[in-house]
Amino acid sequence: MRYAFSETFPLSAETIFEYFRSPESWMRLYGDGEHAIALGNGWYAVPLARSPAPLVVRVVSSSDRTQVDWVFRGFWRGSGRLTLTAVAAGTQVEGEEEIAIRCLGPLSYFIERLVLARVFRGIWNRGWRRLRRLASAGRLRARPLPGDNSCGTQEAEQAAASERTV
């Protein structure tokens, strides 16, 4: 199954990148309160609602906070890429993801079309809605992961504190 996307948000590329820099950070957009499980060597098991198995995924490259590439293994196979581009309205997020169920071979195509396409579109749409809410609330900084000081600013810490109280 191939899912291509092009979305624009009134947020900085740096803010959006913080949600995609690692599978662990994806949980802030797509998760239901669960955490990604580190498997070692950069691999993570990312639990997803209504998914038969967690995504086992690793970010294989990210460049200048404008592009992220990832691959899947285990139950799922495939890869994805996301590119962030500054535009007048904020940041355009473009990319695609190719994903299939490894163990089903040719049957995977039919299962993808009948069930998984809707599930994965729903997962991506959940993330897009959360980014839009973030923008409409005026929170222009991504909240850091627990113990992560990569943003390194008081502003990011204050934004994270205000999100916890809302």
Image: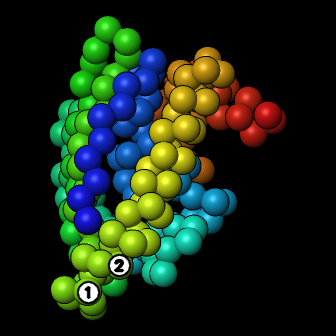
Q: Which residue is mark 1?
A: 107
Instruction: Give the residue at the far top of this rendering.
Output: 88
Q: Which element carries disc 2, helix, strand or loop?
A: helix
Provide the residue designation for mark 2. Answer: 111
Figure quadrant of residue 50: bottom right
Residue at coordinates 57% horizontally, 58% vertically from top-left? Answer: 31
Tell me if mark 1 has few (under 14), some (14-19) or many (20+) residues whose alpha carbon lies within 10 angstroms of its own: few
In the image, is residue 54 above or below residue 87? Answer: below
The three-letter code of the residue at mark 2 reads Ile
Q: Is residue 149 shown to the viewer in this render? A: no
**Residue, far right:** 165
- Residue name at image x 44 percent, y 61 percent: 118
Q: Picture coordinates of residue 56 (x, y %)?
A: 36, 74
Q: Quadrant of the N terminus?
A: bottom left
Q: Residue furthest bottom?
A: 103
Q: Quick check: marks 2 and 1 in contact, CB under 8 Å?
A: yes
The residue carrying pointer 2 sits among few (fewer than 14), some (14 to 19) or many (20 or more) residues within 10 Å by Cα, namely some
Image check: 99 left or right of 20?
A: left
